[in-house]
Every structure is written in structure tokens, then in C-alpha cells.
Amino acid sequence: MSVAALSLYRPVWESRGQRVAGPDEDVLTLAVAAARPLAEQHPVARVVLLTSAPDVLEGFGTGVVARALGLGDAAPVELRIGGADAALGVLLEAAAGTLVVGVDLAPGSAAAGAALMADGGGILLSEAGSVHGSLPMRVRHAGAQLAAVYGDGRVERELATAPLVERLRGEGTTYVVGASPSEAKRLGAAPLPVPTRGPAGVFFALAALGSGDAAEGAARLVALDAASGRAADVSTTSVEVLRDERPGVPVAERPSITQPVEIPFSMPAYARAFEAKIGLIAATCECGATSFPPRQLCLECGETERTTPTPLARTGEVYTYVKVHVPIPGIAGPYGLAIVSVDDTTVRVLAQVADVGAREARIGERGQLVLRRVAVREGVPDYGYAFRSDVDAVEERKSA
């Protein structure tokens, strides 16, 4: 099996050189952020999403992922729990047309990666061995906020990582995911520029191997998770890598919820709006008028039931903008609110402005509509779209 293309995403919020998710981001939105660029360019038959710590165990929004990727209700979306070794295992076993996504949400290592699998071309992967053991260095029980950590790196190295790497290393250069760069060197492996030790790290490692950051020729990639590991032989040919890794914005500028409150939720209203809201689907009448949210009654010609569903573009520009400083119960603030003129249509949508920190958007500014968690209503994640400017906030500050 081979990796035809890769896509990488890291949140903009930065604390002490490490990335953390925003208040409107979770496992699902990070997965869509990484996978959407590939789904826009390639046909996708199936999606497999891996994370070591899902934030929603029951009622995870697989349907949200499918609609947000433009796949409708036909393509299956599967959620799996596992670390770096599990991610490499899925990549080795996935059929052509499968979109594999790995997400890490832990503070300091928030990241996501996606890979589109094919029968040939790109980065070739072949199984090179696996070891399944048990060394519970980190244990987090259901409902617990923090994991119980056995914080002795020497024990982990001597009882788990060192024996695993020794058994799984190849004759050529061996690279390790699931250990820090310094630990990889100590184990006799070559380090890779990987921001996380979890499942997303495998995709960053493959991107490095496929973009000239590693030695040319065949390599052995070893993915570790506690006392388990998996190895693959990787041909380091070039591959398309799409990156969304903007310069970091100080986490002190990240909006926060100052008034926690239970926001009411209506399941019938959720169901009615789901397809249009998550898929960004408008209605276009035979007369040419477009409405969003979609209406059966055309306000231009007055006819009914003469409309067809029309997917909206995910790009546009700010028509007008305001910064909301008054705290809203249950909503992270302060936040920007924009009316966005969507490309190729007369539709304008109201959306929060994401990832700008203290900076304010400007009228005429271009950007993308990206899936975000707009609220949690009676425990149910409520997803919608935010406007993410094309302007690099950090670079703009430097040039100001």
C-alpha cells in the first residue's frame, strides 16, 4: 500500500513553543481541518479517524465528519482509539481510497494529519513487524480529566522503548515516532521533526520522509505506544504534502469562557438544520436565486419547491465586521463576528472570526469558512462554520 498525499494541521495557539487547541476546536474539528484539503482534491471511499484520547465516546459525530468533508451520507466514517502504533497499522492495512486521519488533542501537542491511500505511487509502505506488550506508563480512566502517570523515563526506556526499537529496527536508517527526538537518539534511531508522540506524529513523520528531511532511499519507521510497537519499511520518494501550520499566536490572546452555563438544546431544530449547516448546502431556485439557509419558497419569484441543493464555496471575504467584548454565557470571548460574502454566489453568512487573537479582521479581507465547535448545548457539541482569515496575524504584526 502507498500514501498518495498527506495533509497536516496544527492549531495557531501557542504556549511556551507548543501548540494547544482553541476553545472552538476538538478531535472532530482538527480531523476535518487535516482531511478536508485531501477530500477536496481526491475521491474518498472511506474515512478512518484515530485518536488516543477521544473527547466524545458516545455520540461521536461521524456524520458531521462526512458532511464537512463533502462526502454526504454514503462514505463510512470509523472512529478508532489508539496511539502511533495503531495509526501506522491502519496505514499498512487500509485499502486504496481510504482517508486515514490521526488526531492528538493533548495540551502542548495538539495536531492532526491525514493520508490518502492508493495502490501505487507516492510513499510505499510495507509491513516490517509488530510487537504487542503492556507497560501502563499512562492510564486515564473514563471521566477523569488527568491521566495517572508513572513518571520514570528510565523504566520506560529499559522495559519498553529500547527492547522494542532493538527488535523492530531495520538494516538501514531507523526513525522512531512515539518518543522525543532526544530519546530517539538515545535509542540509536534518527530523529524526525514531529510535534507529537501520538497518532498524528506518524503523518508528520511520513511528510518529513517524503519531503527530503530524511536520508534518501529505503528507511524503517518504528511507531511506539508504551510497550507496543509497529514497524514499516518506507520508500522515501517525494509525495504531495499540504500544510496548514501558521505561526503561533500567544495563548494569552485565546478567547475563553468566563460565564459557564448550560445552553438549551433542541434536537428537532438540530436535525432540521444538520445537512445545510454542516454541509454548507444552499438552495438555488430555477429562477437563479440562491438562499441560505435553504428555503422551499423563493423570495425572488414566489414559486415553491422549484429549488435544488447547492453546495456553497468555503471561501469568501468580509462584508462587515464587529468585535464583541460583552461576555456571552457559555461562549468563549471576546470574539469577532463577521458577515462573509461567499464566493460565486450572492449568499452572505454570519460567522465568528477564528484564530486572530487580539487582531481584528478588516472589511474586504479574504479567508475560508472552517468547521468549528460553536457551542456545547446540554452536553451536545454544536458545530458550525467560522471565518478564518488568509492574513497571517503574526506576520502582519511584524510589518506594522
Image (cartoon, rainbow, N blue to C red):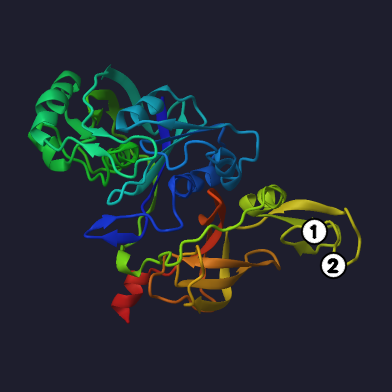
Residue at the location (61% across, 40% down)?
71
Quadrant hosting residue 189: top left
Is 256 placed above or below 226 here? below
Residue under pointer 1: 295
Along the line of sight, the residue nearer the viewer: 97 or 176? 176
Answer left or right for 291 relative to 358: right
Could you tell me residue 305's position as x and y percent?
A: 88, 53
Is 91 placed above or below 167 here? below
Q: Residues within 10 Å of mark 1 (few under 14, many from 20)?
A: some
Along the line of sight, the residue nearer the viewer: 396 or 268? 268
Could you tell me residue 12's position as x and y percent?
A: 36, 60
User: Is residue 284 shown to the viewer in this render?
Assistant: yes
Residue at the location (10% across, 29% down)?
155
Q: Which residue ends up furthest to the bottom in the rendered image? A: 400
The kind of secondary structure element at disc 1 is: loop
Residue under pointer 2: 299
- Which label is found at residue 336? none
Quadrant location, the N terminus: top left
User: Is residue 250 shown to the viewer in this render?
Assistant: no
Q: Residues within 10 Å of mark 2 (few under 14, many from 20)?
A: few
Q: Are marks 1 and 2 in contact (CB under 8 Å)?
A: yes
Q: CA distance from mark 1 to mark 2?
A: 9 Å
Could you tell me residue 120's position as x and y percent?
A: 43, 27
Along the line of sight, the residue nearer the viewer: 333 or 211? 333
Kind of residue indicated by mark 1? Arg
Could you tell me residue 24's position as x and y percent?
A: 46, 57
Kind of residue indicated by mark 2? Leu
